[in-house]
Amino acid sequence: MNAQSNLGTLLTDTLANTLDVSVPLFRPELCLAATVVLLLLCRILPVLKHADSALVALGGVAFGLWYAWSDFKALPAGGDLLAGRQELFTGLLVYDSLTAYVRLLLMGFLVLYILFTKVSEIPDREDGADFYTLVLGSTLGMCLMASANHLLMVFMAIEMASVPSYALAGLLKGRKASSEAALKYAVYGAGAAGIMLYGLSLLAGVLGTCHLPSMAVELAKVAHVGSDGGSVMVLSLGGLMLAVGLAFKLSAVPFHFWCPDVFEGAAAEVGAFLSVASKAAAVALLLRVTFGLGVPAGGLGVPAGGEAAAQSLAALGETRHFMVYVVALMAAVTCTLGNLAAYGQTNMKRLLAYSTIAHAGYLMMGVAAAIAMAGVTASGTRDAVSAVAFYLGTYVFMNLGAFAIVALLRNTLRSEEISSYAGLVRTSPGIVVAMAVVLVSLIGLPPLAGFVAKFLVFSSIVEAITAGAERPLLLVLLVIGGLNTVISLFYYLRVLKVMTFDPPSDERATEPFSLVSLPGAVVTAFVLPVVGFGLFWSGLYAAAQLAGAFAS
């Protein structure tokens, strides 16, 4: 009878917690799920077959954006992590300032993205419901990636984000390159998922738990008490296998091979989605996993109960040291290969794919600096995470703007080759100026948003070096980051050189692309924030600092 009573109490408490705490903080994801169901009904029910799927998707995402904004505005003043952090659904997910920020970013991106695809006319009306179902389903997985607090949710979230992306890559029916891109993406993703899942099983088997904060406690015990070399080796191997899955989503070297082929074979609209949304979610998950395993629950502020927490933080020093070296090495190689490989590209989408790989390297540099400072200074750690969050915010507009220009020029020129842009300044000077703004911002030159983003990331590395955190490694990383910025200057400017100085081909369509049009208005809407956040960046940085509070 007592056992039945305890079970009944447990179920009652769990249900009450789910309805009172978890569901209200899960409303944006529920809006996406409900919209996916509605879009599927649009394909099934005759009464809804004539509904515009883009408007249906936009309406659902608008509700999700409203809830995401409300939750973000309701975060505790000053970004107090202990006051704002809340575990959801019995610890599977966690809600904090990072979750709120990334979720808001993804919802805002979706609104812009749906408007962009409506103007670019891919997908067409027949495939619209299927396309937006896949996009919203993948974004739902990305929201879960940002809030994962359990190894099972890490795996499920990555797969929820990845599987719809495989189908999106093959959206262009009857096109061999698109089908090939989808097949390569799916095969490579399946391999990465298998390796990651085996790594998760190794970590859970040795530590006896899948809950990230509990795993940090067990890791601290292993480090404090000591363990046989076999356990340490298994933990290291499991961590590296987990890194494979994260690197696949980040398109980080050496798990980047899918990226250029998929971007070239898929529609530019799909490339924009994979480049921006997938990157934001993957970086958030990287932060979530590294801080979940490298910092004891409660953060760096050493919560009440304090001496034990301080000892745990010190004991996890070796874990953080291992993470810093893995992330920093991958960041340096990823950034360098992405920039060097972009040189010989003749297809604009393929060039932007390597650009995406390079920017993943810059983002991982900020993550490495944040992990390095986790055991040194809470304010420095927060600044580093804030720099990464700011970078993600500006990256939305930079890359979405670049892919939007490629897609809309494709509709006009019937080509995505860089050579087809020759002499475009003579007929369409407005679009050339827009492309110049986006590409110069991707380089990281002032006074555009990309400069501020890179400056903040490099400043966080300098701050870590000054604080004495992994000084030799981060000093080399800083030099590599600076050199890569110079290297990227050449291939970005090569595109502008073709647009402005090369003579136009006689075979090219002469129809000009005017910014005084609906497609022009979409391009302008993406480009103006790139300029605005470069000149007036304090508002976005304040939001990014709030996101960085999760690590303080």
Image (spheres, grey):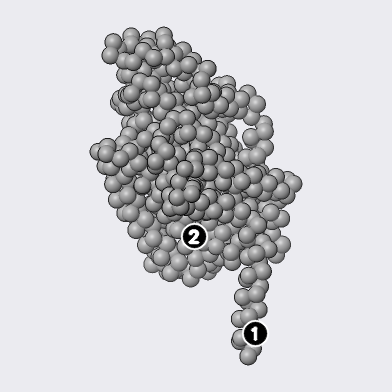
Q: Residue at point 33% right, 23% down?
A: 414
Q: Nearer the viewer, residue 55 or 144?
A: 55
Going from N to C along the chain, the mark reached first, 2 or 1, is: 1
Residue 276 rendering spot, x and y as whole percentages: 47, 38
- Circle 2 crowding by C-alpha within 10 Å: few under 14, some 14–19, many from 20: many
Query: What numbered label is drawn on residue 5?
Result: 1
At mark 2, the secondary structure is: helix
Q: Residue at point 65% right, 26% down?
A: 536
Query: What numbered label is drawn on residue 526?
Result: none
Left/right placement of residue 35 relative to residue 505 reads: right
Q: Residue furthest front?
A: 47
Query: Which amino acid does the dot numbered 1 rest on?
Result: Ser
Residue 113 rendering spot, x and y as whole percentages: 50, 36
Query: Which amino acid does the dot numbered 2 rest on?
Result: Met
Query: What numbered label is drawn on residue 153?
Result: 2
Residue 196 vs 355, above or below: the answer is: below
Q: Nearer the viewer, residue 346 or 542?
A: 346
